Image (cartoon, rainbow, N blue to C red):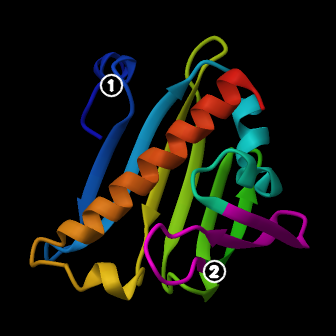
Amino acid sequence: MGQDSGELSELLERGPLVLVESDAVGRFASATAIVEIARPADAVWRVTSDFAGHRTFMPKLVASTPTPRGPNEVDVRFEIAIPFPGRNERYTFRYVLDPARREIHGRWVAGDLRDSTCDWRILAAGDARARVHYTIATRNFSKLVTTFEDSQQTVTVGVNVASALAAIKALKARVETGP
């Protein structure tokens, strides 16, 4: 990232950080939110990899129903409440988990948000602390919202940054304070 660990830690003491990345032609590629959590990385991993439990703390998440596909692979059907007229977003992601590295890679397989991806990475950050990186590239969301898109992709960037921040802040609160 070009930041030394000390400088990054100083920035994270003030709150979560978000990096917005572009592709080779300057279009939105992904948003990565980073936060430090005052709990061991293994404790953060347990909450992050418990997909059925996500609905109890993630904002606007109405349902999260996992269906195991193998020892480290699971499909999760999500439903997110949408605050304006229309229907909720419903989609399924396939997740591949790497417990040894505390990494999860997710990709769209069905429903809304076609071609979207996400990745979780949980790192030990000193004594009883974890640093969480959550990278998302949400695509093909609400047709109504995307009608307001401009050449700078303000809507796409905004949706991705807000979603990544909401997810890691909710995870932090859940892990640090419990259910």
Q: CA distance from mark 2 to mark 1?
A: 34 Å
Front in this rendered view, residue 106 or 110: 110
Q: Which residue was labeled with disc 1?
A: 8
User: What's the residue at 41%, 79% (across, down)?
Assistant: 139
Residue 119's image quarter? bottom right
Residue 51's image quarter? bottom right
Label 2: element kind: strand
Image: magenta residue range: 62-89
User: What's the residue at 39%, 51% (across, down)?
Assistant: 32
Kind of residue sitting beneath label 1: Leu
Other residues around mark 2 within 10 Å, as few (<14) / some (14–19) / many (≥20): some
- Magenta stretch, overall SS: strand
Q: Quadrant of the N terminus?
A: top left
In the image as oriented, which residue stretches furthest toward the left?
A: 151
Kind of residue sitting beneath label 2: Tyr
Please report contact status of discs 2 and 1: CB closer than 8 Å, yes or no. Answer: no
Q: Position of residue 18 (x, y in %)?
A: 32, 44
Of circles 2 and 1, the one toward us is 2
